[in-house]
Amino acid sequence: MADQDNSQNRLLTIRNLWIEGQSEDKWSPIIKGVDLDLNRGEVLGLIGESGAGKSTLGLAAMGFTRDGCRISEGTVEFDGIDLRHAEPGERRALLGKRIAYVAQSAAASFNPAHKLIDQYSEAPVVHGVMSRQQAETDATSLYGQMQLPDPGQIGFRYPHQVSGGQLQRAMTAMAMSCRPDLIIFDEPTTALDVTTQIEVLAAIRTIVKEFNTAAIYITHDLAVVAQMADRIKVLLKGEEVEEADTRIMLSSPQKDYTKSLWAVRSYARAEQGDTDKGTPVVSVRNVTAGYGATTVLDDVSFDFYQGRTVAVVGESGSGKSTAARVITGLLPPSSGEVLFDGKPLPADYRSRHRDQLRQVQMIYQMADTALNPKLRLRELIGRPAQMYLGLKGKALDERVRELLSLIELEPDQYIDRLPSELSGGQKQRIGIARALAAEPKFIICDEVTSALDQLVAEGILRLLDNLQAEFNLGYMFITHDLATVRAIADDVVVMQRGKVVEQGRKAAMFQPPHHPYTELLLSSVPEMDPDWLSNLLEARAEAG
Amino acid sequence: MSILISIFWFAVAVVGAMALGWLFRAFVVAVSPQRQAQEMRTAPLTASFGLLVILIYVLVAALAPIIAPFGESEVVGGEFLPWDSTYLLGTDNLGRDMLTRMIYGARNTVGIAFTITALAFFVGTVLGLLAAVVGGWLDQVLSRSVDVLMAIPSLIFSLLLLTIFGTSVLSLVLVIATVDATRVFRLARSVAQGIVVMDYIEAARLRGEGKWWLITREILPNAMAPLVAEFGLRFCFVFLAISGLSFLGLGIQPPTADWGGMVRDNATLITFGDLTPFLPAGAIALLTVAVNFVVDWQLHKSSGLKE
């Protein structure tokens, strides 16, 4: 009897699935024999690093593979229908109607030329579920349930007229339009700020529960998946590591790999004393700056000291990166000045002396675009040393090797590689080495870990930390991730809409009382506790 | 019936060309070092055939005085002699050996075309990248001047300039290079504009790099693929432009042998059903096709497309 119940309740069954991808005329496996079961109304969290095959597996649940990939073995059965061998027409009838997909970047996935409601209505009308009229009424009510502002009108806007978080909710509503049995969420909140993320998470959770929809929730963020999923499956390099109910998985992970994922969040460096800080290496004095008529930074001041890390925190648009551009001289401020070792720096980088340029280095968020893809590491790293320190020939070669060893890459193996022959984390290390090659006093790290997986990011943070201790560097660490702040910062500057709302020692910053905005930021960081989101929403509802 | 026969010969030519391509590829793979051999092994037959043809042209051009049976402008016999064992391809309207003229023509026409294309690319690329890197008024001045030059039809513009400056080889090279440099400038500038916004260019600027370094080390290597493809196409266009101008009497001046001029000089023979005047035209056509085969291969590789 129990078995029968179970099979009636079973929505999706994947057995021994192998997916291969084509690279350089060879097929190599991406998914290696994964099983997956999903019951009606259940939410399964898929987590793993990038390249683990999460998205590929998620798409395979729709019987779909990306171009250049193929399912080579195994079965995908959705409610008794064999999706792998289904006719294209048969599969098309299911997609959008009974299986829906929510992509990572709603901004990139909506068609910018059509209004939201037109895109909402398309699926129900095509599948013959509703008339256009009904679909529009339905959209309004679902927009309301997704807590979108002005649900009656928002559908008549174009995607660019709506904020990112709202767009992500509109996309979830759209996926819900035919009341599908299964929705696949592929990192739906990864591109959002923590404060917006909460709203989207809450809306998704409510609506999935309301319609008893089954979901596969793909993410690399453990704390997020803890809020959303009933069950968690951990993937590593296309293979399942382990699977368990959320609470069990969080409290007692079995495998070493899972434990290491869990442990990342606990990294924190030793607290630095407030001992004699001396003259600030860089100090920003009453800077106001902007692009054209819009002011992005409004009378901002803060200081950086050698050997200390200042984390600059805030949502996107708060002016963090603009502050970095002012310090480097890319954006001359309209008033105020930047001091280096107590002496003013010219506002424009073009009028700065070579030695002034050398002292302030920058590490970029996207190592992919920050490294010239056609230069070998020897030249990428060697150039600043050659330029600023006049190293040549053998001395230069030795210096490059020394730098490579510093960033924990084997010199002989890597010195003649191109950036495309490196992994994401290694590329970021090259970015660090390039900054170090100039032997600066001060380094700006602009979201250096936000494009990386947690394990890799932790490695980068540790490296930065060691280098700081060794060379007495001052860091400006721009981030929106408070876990990173906790891990690496000595001092914290919180920014909102171009203003500094709070600054001080890290310990003080994480202790109440907070500025209301800091409080909002802090409370919005997902925690590993599966009840965190419910509790938070309850608390906020009571408060406001 | 005659259609069938021409189809048959066409098929034979295609198969023969591919077979030559295959043999040439096998040969190159066998003799070249590891890295190039790897590259060559994946080359399509069309590309290796193209490479083979280009190689032959280059050899012929370089070794012209050795290969050619007679002197370049030596009158060796009667006018319009038919093909025989002494004059393999007969003689032309002044009694010069046709084969000799063809061989020297390769040297003159191909050599000048290559010089022009190289010059056009050097000037166009440097200015285009400079405009993208510096921006502002320099970009405006250069781009708008180029717009003005491009607004005049190129053939008429070259005719005009050649009439003013006279028809020496030097002025021919400079005039066509100027006209073509405008096209290269447009391409180089638009490709470079996509590259200068990358973070690595910003990083180089913040490092205090000069413009020459930015252009040659940071931008040019990343703009190479479209520029190389354009080089192949441009080369063909230049070729056609020289031949066209020669045909009009403004290109390479007699008695220098040149394929375009040879077609014009011997055009009378066509009325008598003799195909000899078509040989220089055919030589131009074959080189054009060969260059495009190679360019297509390079384009395909740089775009990263898979069949």
Image (cartoon, rainbow, N blue to C red):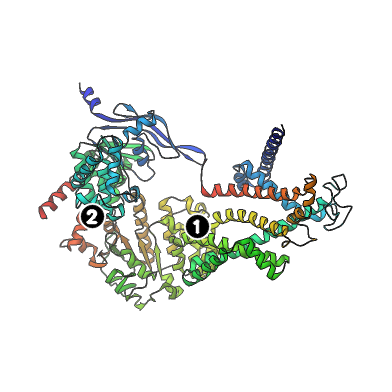
Q: Indicate the amino acid at tag 1.
A: Leu
Q: Indicate the amino acid at tag 2.
A: Thr
Residue at the disc numbered 2: A195
Camera-nearest residue between B138 and B242: B242
**Number of marks drawn:** 2
| SS state under label 2 | helix
Q: Position of residue A366 (x, y in %)?
A: 39, 56
The answer to whether residue A344 is above or below residue A33 is below
Residue located 31% across and 64% down the image: A320
For the question of whether residue B147 can be seen, the reply is yes
Q: Quadrant of residue A58?
A: top left
Residue B186 as seen in the image, left or right of residue A207? right
- Give the chain letter at badge 2: A
| SS state under label 1 | helix
Q: Position of residue A289 (x, y in %)?
A: 32, 71
Residue located 70% across and 51% down the image: B284
Q: Position of residue A244 (x, y in %)?
A: 26, 36
Q: Are marks 2 and 1 in contact (CB under 8 Å)?
A: no
Using a 10 Å C-alpha cutoff, classify the residue at mark 2 as few (fewer than 14 neighbours), some (14 to 19) or many (20 or more): some
Q: Quadrant of residue A47?
A: top left
Residue at the disc numbered 1: A377
Residue A43 as seen in the image, left or right of residue B307? left
- Give the chain letter at badge 1: A
Camera-nearest residue between A291 and A448: A291
